[in-house]
Amino acid sequence: MTDQPTGGEHPVLSKKERMKIDRQLMPEQDAILRSSNFREVNLGLTEQIAFLEAERCLQCPKPYCVDGCPVRVNIPRFIERLTQGDMKGAAESLLDDNALPCVTGRVCPQETQCEQVCLRAKTGKPVAIGYLERFVADWANDHMDGLAKGSPEASGRRVAVIGSGPAGLTAAGELVKYGHKVTIFEAFHAAGGVLVYGIPEFRLPKDIVQAEVDRLVAKGVEIRPNTIIGKTYTLPELREMFDAVFIAVGAGLPIFMNIPGENLKGVYSANEYLTRVNLMGAWNPESDTPILKGRRVAVVGGGNVAMDSVRTAKRLGASEAICVYRRSREELPARAEEVHHAEQEGVRFDFLVAPVEVLGDEHGWVTGLRCIRMELGEPDASGRRRPVPIEGSEYVIECEEVVVAIGTRSNPLLTRTAPELQINQWGYIVTDQHGMTSMPGVFAGGDIVRGAATVILAMGDGKRAAHAIQAYLSGNYPPPPEPDEIAAEEKAAKAAARKEHAAAAAAH
């Protein structure tokens, strides 16, 4: 928990003085201690550190950081209020822009978004926007009774949101601002989606997620758990019951490697493995949820889900937790901070390695993972160099457990009950640029549209869809373009003009 800021006056620093301040570090648990517990790794900024880091913000006339944020948080505004000691103002500013700031302050990849375009990064390290967001959001959670509470006039319109993950919660948070009655339908017994079943406690404590959900419920959002759209109700039935629908069911169907031995006992999809631990409490010795606890665990994949899985295995008591990744360290898609933390905690990385077979004993239990070494060839469709097998380089990783974390795809449970809903060849829902599907009044966003992606991108989809739903319910669909859409159009127009100019110059 962060120290509680006292507010008050703070000295005004010149730009030159601000430029001399180094980026502040986030206090964290000792690596050896945390590798055997599920308590949060990052401990949050103290008041002193937070105010010092906030002073690094230059309050740029053109805030590129806002353009880099998928939910378009007014970053300079809440940071400026923080530097002034106005914690209430900073909190209200942040909450007005972001439905889940305690979440994004912990798991959003700021280093590739808002912080990547921070002007301070041109001559040093960017402002730690994520750290400051967490600091202000946690303060807001502890002082919610003293913050402004809007109470919009009821619109008389009802909107259904399918799925209570980041896209669904964000959309609900925006829609209630318009006075709509919002009902979230959640398949699981607890709200939060991937925030509760996919992300471990040591990265995102479940009480933090619950606090965010409780805040939305206090604003009037209704949540109906244990309700599966596609079974409890079909999508057409739901559409008849509500004025608009937003689909945010994610893409939770696991992908496997299709190699021999994947049906052996001891092979998990990352989805099942993390759900058992996170949502069903298998990390707790007193839990009724069973989970295997191998002495040696191999996790296949290199994304954030793989990092969550391999670090979870370590905390469940694995003497050796191994991340098997077919490309090199430079191509790892996981957040740099998560990779760094995994290395600190003793996770072993086997790079440029691809599994070819899961080995087992006569009783059907996993005994090892046969792999082949790879080398990087020419770039593939992703732009990364394609891994190519090295003939005769096979070897075996001895292990009792294999966790497959190579991605997910869409689940057809909902879409097959609505044949009029257009989907693409991969089973993802097709929408227009504002999120409307082929069914009028039905919108979609997040992983079920874009494929497996980050929490913050799903939230961005939820926020844009909410504004589009409001335009639809108001009879003003399609809505005016978002600032980032305008910027993209201007960029494309300028590029076309440059190309035309170059062609004309070449002709002469």
Image: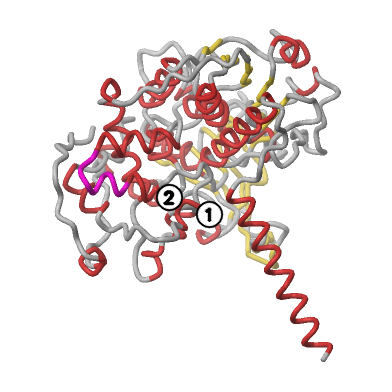
Q: Are marks 2 and 1 in contact (CB under 8 Å)?
A: yes
**Residue 36 at x, y = what percent?**
31, 33
Q: Which residue sits at x=80%, y=33%?
A: 423
**Residue 375 at x, y = what percent?**
63, 64
**In the image, residue 81 lies in the stretch drawn in magenta:** yes
Residue 95 sits above or below residue 125 on the image: above
Drawn side of residue 416 relative to residue 468, left or right:
right
Is residue 151 or residue 387 the one in the foreground? Answer: 151
Give the structural element (helix, strand or loop) at label 1: loop
Residue 120 sits above or below residue 403 on the image: below
User: Dot 1: within a 10 Å radius of its alpha carbon, few (fewer than 14), some, or many (20 or more) residues?
Assistant: some
**In the image, residue 212 lies in the stretch drawn in magenta:** no
- Residue indicated by mark 1: 332
Drawn side of residue 247 relative to residue 321, left or right:
right
Q: Which residue sits at x=42%, y=34%?
A: 96
* Disc on the earlier residue, 2 or 1: 1
Residue 37 sits above or below residue 372 on the image: above
Drawn side of residue 72 relative to residue 379, left or right:
left
Quarter where residue 228 is shown? top right
Q: Which label is found at residue 339?
A: 2
Is residue 484 or residue 383 the one in the foreground? Answer: 484
Q: Which residue sits at x=23%, y=32%?
A: 1
What's the residue type where badge 2 is placed?
Val
